[in-house]
Amino acid sequence: MDRTTDVAAAIERLRQSRVKTPPASEASASFSAMGRQLERSSRRLGSIAEAWLEVCPAGLVERTSVKSFVSGTLTIGVRDAATRFELDRVLRTGMERELVRRTPSTLRSVKVVIEAPVDAGTS
């Protein structure tokens, strides 16, 4: 019995000396930080995204997405080269001026980039 008591005491000492953060709090901190970042992005892009939806033709809205707004440059993502060409033509024929007029922030230029296709087979 004495040996069993010694082993139990040693195990208890190990449990008390181990410091382990529960996984739930690590995940919660990560989600919390991500939520703050999304909130900041939403505030920054909210009015610009609304202006984009108002100005962009209906046929192009579904094939585009507002990616970022940094230093006066609005980056728009498109699915393919054909959409990029079509959007470029529309921007040059007055849509960019209209977007600048409706945007409360200082918009200097619109950059159009082709987004990489999302592969459904990878995680």
Image (cartoon, rainbow, N blue to C red):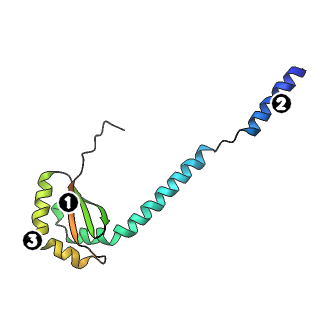
Chain-order first, disc 3 or disc 2? 2
Residue corresponding to mark 2: 9
Residue corresponding to mark 1: 112
Q: Indicate the amino acid at tag 2.
A: Ala
- Residue beneath the point at 85% across and 25% down: 6
Q: Secondary structure at mark 1?
A: strand
Pointer 2 local density, CA inside 10 Å: few below 14, some 14–19, many at least 20:
few
Pointer 3 local density, CA inside 10 Å: few below 14, some 14–19, many at least 20:
few
Residue corresponding to mark 3: 93
Residue 34 location (% of width, % of height): 47, 56
Q: Secondary structure at mark 2?
A: helix
Q: Indicate the amino acid at tag 3.
A: Thr
Report the Cα–Cα distance between label 1 and label 3.
Answer: 15 Å
Chain-order first, disc 2 or disc 1? 2
Residue 37 location (% of width, % of height): 44, 60
Residue 69: name its quadrant.
Answer: bottom left
- Residue beneath the point at 55% across and 52% down: 28
Q: Secondary structure at mark 3?
A: helix
Label pair 2/1, CB-CB below 8 angstroms: no
